Image (cartoon, grey):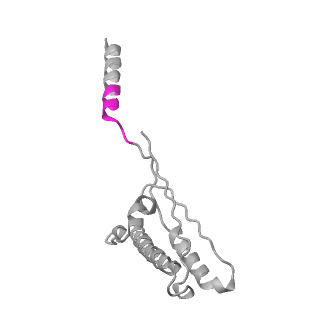
Amino acid sequence: MRSSKLHLVDLAGSERIHKTDPDSVIKNEAKYINKSLSFLEQVIVALHKRAKGKKEAHVPYRNSMMTQILKDSLGGNCKTVMVATLALDKSNEDETLSTARFAHRCQKLVNDISINEQHDLATVVKKLQEQNIELSKRLF
């Protein structure tokens, strides 16, 4: 049996907190998004260190529910694509540079991709028994 996963994560709306109204819902959402991005960046930096050969680098997947869920996509057995949306306005220059740097760090992730297969033991036993009968017939 072959299986696959698809994770779609939208981290849009991570504006600078100082640009929003102090009592708005958007500010509260931006704080949570920025916190998740911070944990995601910590995981990416640790995976990059590990890829460079530093085996003692701890990967903090458990710091966030999002990084725990994305464990396979970040450093596991998955193809990973990141889409970064950049704003070209001069007023958004800081956010654009920050997003571009983050996307560049994500680009350095290396995953070992292989086919996700699980074998049903009953089916394997049945095939081996059939193969055994066929080989016995050849001998005699």
Which quadrant holds residue 71?
bottom left
Q: Pinpoint residue 66: horizontal percent, then vertical percent.
A: 42, 66
Residue 122: within the magenta? Answer: yes
Residue 13 vertical placement versus 75 (above, below): below
Asked whether 38 or 115 is in front, the reply is 38
Q: Pinpoint residue 7: horizontal percent, then vertical percent.
A: 49, 58
Q: Is residue 77 left or right of residue 138?
A: right
Asked whether 21 or 86 is in front, the reply is 21
Asked whether 52 or 10 is in front, the reply is 10
Q: Is residue 72 left or right of residue 21?
A: left
* Residue at the limit of the structure toward the top, as seen here: 140
Q: Is residue 121 left or right of residue 97?
A: left
Predominant secondary structure, magenta span: helix
Q: Which residues lie in the magenta part?
A: 118-127
At x 47%, y 63%, the residue is 110
At x 43%, y 62%, the residue is 70
At x 63%, y 83%, the residue is 92
Q: Pinpoint residue 91: horizontal percent, then vertical percent.
A: 65, 86
Asked whether 105 or 89 is in front, the reply is 89
Q: Quadrant of the N terminus?
A: top left
Q: Quadrant of the C terminus?
A: top left
Residue 53 vertical placement versus 121 (above, below): below
Residue 96: within the magenta? Answer: no
